[in-house]
Image (spheres, grey):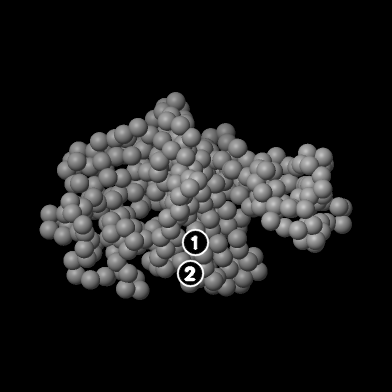
């Protein structure tokens, strides 16, 4: 794979269809985008790995949303890793990149002392997908319990339980060193999804963890054979093939599924992007009285706010905040840079 080919496939999601199997899917490659998401924060390895996994899932799932829509993942638990949140913003226009951001909240002391895998350290909780179609609409929200031992398994359970779609993810994320460069995050993944000919139903009850539906519960007969065959082929994928950069996504599809007649569509570029701004900070504070704003004011006489996603810092004049503001915005000492 040449350098030009590598650059062409970096930070993209490639949709495909397997014509012989009635299965659709996506291949995602995130390198610069994933690196930028994770370098906004100094996460411990356990947290960084889960944020990378959530970001990969978000890119694979989010590729299907329409222009200017927003898809979010929220993973909440009662363990030391309390929250992982991601946002995927659909392109602003055809041909434009989608934008992503992500962050995690965790208890550093509990993270060090409590045993278990990184996924175990989320604890009991929920996996949620939210879709916002824009102003004037009610956001859609689907929630399933955390189960299966990984975020990828949680996402597959979500689609089986909430959408009645047999779904599987194969993901790989790591810090990779290239000649002449330091270590940087790269991630790759494949999502496959069986498209039912009619409304699906569980063929023999729920067989997943905690009594939840699993992908195999939703396919039967010829569909079951197709689903099993494609999953067996996907089992042969290697982590280095998923991450790249030496095997391009289209070549990987041919290597895995050439007998299934893969058909690829236009790739969607993905970039890091945060939507925070001083205007949004001011809007969020507009519901507070002057007394409330006073409680938020520091000893230096300013109100500060930090974006959890990109780390932008805002320093605002309290007199210009809240519904009892006495000064117009712009007379304060300025603010930190916001996201794009």
Secondary structure under tag 1 reads strand
Q: Residue at x 48, y 52 (%)?
A: 72
Res 302 label: none
Give the left or right position of residue 336, taking residue 59 as reference: right
Q: Residue at x 46, y 36 (%)?
A: 91
Query: Residue 154 falls in which quadrant of the image?
Result: bottom left
> How many marks do you count on the picture?
2
Secondary structure under tag 2 reads strand
Query: Residue 210 falls in which quadrant of the image?
Result: bottom left
User: Where does label 2 land, which residue?
Assistant: 125
Give the left or right position of residue 149, taking residue 160 as reference: right
The image position of residue 208, as x and y in percent, is 31, 69
The image position of residue 331, as x and y in percent, is 82, 40
Quadrant of the image containing the N terminus = top left
Q: Nearest the camera: 42 or 158?
A: 158
Mark 1 crowd level (few <14, some 14–19, many ≥20, 10 Å Cα): many
Contact check, label 1 and label 2, Cβ < 8 Å: yes
User: Where does label 1 land, which residue?
Assistant: 75
Rendered view: 272 above or below 1: below
What is the distance, in whole Å, between disc 1 and disc 2 at their CAs?
8 Å
Q: Residue at x 19, y 70 (%)?
A: 204
Give the left or right position of residue 38, taking residue 334 as reference: left
Q: Residue at x 24, y 38 (%)?
A: 262
């Amino acid at each position: 794979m040449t350098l030009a080919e590598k650059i062409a496939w970096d930070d993209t999601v490639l949709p495909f269809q397997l014509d012989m199997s009635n299965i659709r899917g996506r291949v995602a490659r995130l390198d610069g985008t994933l690196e930028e998401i994770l370098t906004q924060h100094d996460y411990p390895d356990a947290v960084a790995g889960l944020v990378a996994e959530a970001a990969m899932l978000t890119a694979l799932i989010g590729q299907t949303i329409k222009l200017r829509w927003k898809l979010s993942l929220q993973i909440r638990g009662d363990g030391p890793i309390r929250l992982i949140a991601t946002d995927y913003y659909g392109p602003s226009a055809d041909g434009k990149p989608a934008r992503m951001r992500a962050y995690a909240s965790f208890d550093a002391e509990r993270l060090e002392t409590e045993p278990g895998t990184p996924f175990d350290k989320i604890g009991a909780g929920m996996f949620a997908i939210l879709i916002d179609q824009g102003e004037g609409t009610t956001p859609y929200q689907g929630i399933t319990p955390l189960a299966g031992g990984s975020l990828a398994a949680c996402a597959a359970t979500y689609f089986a339980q909430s959408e009645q779609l047999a779904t599987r993810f194969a993901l790989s994320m790591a810090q990779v060193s290239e000649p002449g460069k330091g270590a940087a995050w790269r991630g790759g993944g494949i999502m496959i999804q069986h498209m039912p000919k009619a409304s699906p139903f569980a063929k023999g009850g729920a067989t997943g963890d905690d009594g939840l539906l699993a992908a195999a519960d939703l396919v039967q007969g010829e569909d079951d054979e197709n689903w099993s065959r494609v999953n067996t082929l996907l089992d042969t994928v290697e982590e280095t093939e998923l991450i790249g950069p030496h095997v391009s996504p289209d070549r990987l599809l041919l290597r895995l599924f050439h007998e299934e007649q893969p058909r690829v569509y236009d790739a969607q570029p993905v970039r890091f992007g945060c939507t925070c701004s001083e205007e949004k900070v001011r809007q969020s504070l507009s519901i507070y009285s002057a007394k409330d704003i006073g409680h938020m004011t520091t000893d230096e006489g300013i109100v500060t706010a930090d974006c959890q996603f990109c780390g932008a810092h805002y320093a605002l004049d309290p007199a210009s905040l809240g519904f009892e503001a006495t000064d117009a915005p712009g007379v304060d000492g300025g603010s930190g840079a916001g996201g794009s």
